[in-house]
Amino acid sequence: MLTLGINYSQMHDSSACIVRDGELLFAVAEERISRVKHDSGFPKLAIQACLDFAEVTAGQLDEVCFGWQTAGPIYRHDLKLYATGHWPLTKVNVLNSSRYFLSMWHQESGAAPFRRIFGESKTRFRYVDHHLAHAISAYAYSGFDDAAVAVMDGRGAWEATSIWRGRAGRLEHLLTLNWPDSLGLFYAQFTGFLGFVPNSDEWKVMGLAPYGQQGIDLSPFINPHDQPYRVHSKTLVGDGSQFSHLTPLLGLPREPESEISEQHKNIAFAVQDACEAAMMSVIKMALAKTGSRNLCLAGGVALNSKANGKIVASGAIEKIFVQPAASDDGVALGAALAPYLDDNGRLPNKAMRHGYWGPSFDDDAIEKTLLTYKIRHTKLSDTATAAAQFLSEGKILGWFQGRMEFGPRALGSRSILADPRDPEMNAKVNNAVKFREWWRPFAPSFKKEAVPEYLESAYDSPFMILTAQVRPGKRSVIPSVTHVDGSARPQTVEREINPLYYRLIDEFGAITGVPVIMNTSFNLRGEAIVHTPTDALRTFFSSGMDALVIGSYVIEK
Ligand SMILES: [Fe+2]
């Protein structure tokens, strides 16, 4: 069976993946190809890339599976909320709901543009409930036979949080909390209040939180410790006007790009603290309802690596799998497997051990690009050793190798790398390359075997989606990847999974005695991670990177 999974909601992170006989072949987010960050358009480029990779035409697909319900249920839920007073009944809100419904209805929730672009065929279209698609994306790539599955996001059609039992390839639905009782909504509202972009910049709030102190009371907006948590959406959203309801309790919202005050830091602290408590409440319920000690997470809220680290450190679970594309780009992965549940069938369940599901470019393609732009370059006999040498000399390095990552993190395919021992490196990379906020930490890639020496909890973290505490004695050894609260967001790199990247870290360790490197995504602030050699060159030459190792070639400034 050949299935295509799609995320298309017109909201954010459109994507596509292709699965053959239960085996994920390829996945890519539209933003990487279109270069529009969080692209919400119909993912025609991503779909074409999937078909090209599998060397098939659209007509050969057995099913095209969207990770969303059709527009009708979404609209019905919205109307119910207006009628019952659970969401502000304003002209703008009703207009937005109606416009969304009409647009998606007109597009047959994605089937119409698919047929228009890829041609008419007998291929069947399927619309998978959004949280089911998230739940499959977590469980069916975990490798756990038996698991508690929790999905937490902004919203599906009606869903905001759901709990499932995964067992023997089947998923049983146990509980749903309906929108707007939503942790994603809660976090997004405060992300906006703090002057950042909701449903995009939640990372910034999470990074700011450790600079704040306890003292802000968010109980009018959320009861995080209740089982299940309750978000008081009426006080959180008020009459729908921009933050007017938050101001009496928290002061004026922060202007974007303005100074960060102590109050802003304290709000970030309180929001993160409440989110962690609420997530823990959901997980305790999931564990109690299923009796399992294996946990699978998906949904945008599951990208909260700080909370995930605390879940691991709590000792409540034995094993965890957080689907690395936990946000909506990842529902394509779940949707593509939904047909396997038909007729009492079982999901394939192979543990996902890496995130390298995207396109790649070989040396021929890279050299052709370098020659086209007349860029002076050298061919390396040993890229890992040369790159390790650059890093040990304090150089900031672009690293473009192999298949691109699927999900928001760069994991050693499209990365900017630097020496984590230099306490100034954080500022250097920020000033030269990322141009991003001073409080946002950079993350380390560890040689897997080195993790127990550096981190207090040595849980496998191939996807940079869990934080852990750096051992106190090691914080001054890797200062530029240790956050203000002593935490780090590690990637553990295994030799068998990514031999080249592993060897680079190993060689850096041989030179410096520290088998750890700073790894941040290969993009400038506000841009999508680079996809093609041309994207990489453009980013390299419009930043302060010192060298670019691209395939077997190096370019130095
Ligand atoms: Fe979602």
Image (tube, rainbow, N blue to C red):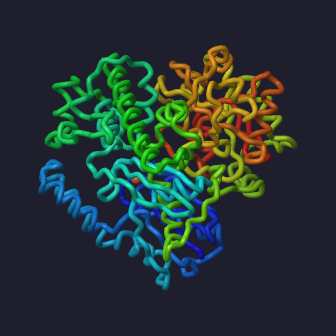
520 above or below 90?
A: above
Q: Residue at x 59, y 27 (%)?
A: 429
Question: Could you tell me residue 398's position as x and y percent?
Answer: 67, 38
Q: Nearer the viewer, residue 17 or 290?
A: 290
Q: Nearer the viewer, residue 122 or 437?
A: 122
Residue at far right of view: 381
Q: Residue at x 79, y 22 (%)?
A: 512
Where, quadrant-wise, is the N terminus in this rendering? bottom right
The quadrant in which residue 433 appears is top right
Question: Could you tell me residue 153's position as x and y percent?
Answer: 38, 48
Q: Can you see residue 557?
A: no
The number of discs equals: 0
406 above or below 546?
A: below
Question: Could you tell me residue 113's position as x and y percent?
Answer: 41, 72
The reply, left or right, for residue 182 in relation to residue 408 is: left
Q: Residue at x 23, y 24 (%)?
A: 250
Q: Can you see residue 359?
A: yes
The reply, left or right, for residue 384 in relation to residue 401 is: right
124 above or below 474?
A: below
The reply, left or right, for residue 261 in relation to residue 236 is: right
Where, quadrant-wise, is the C terminus in this rendering? top right
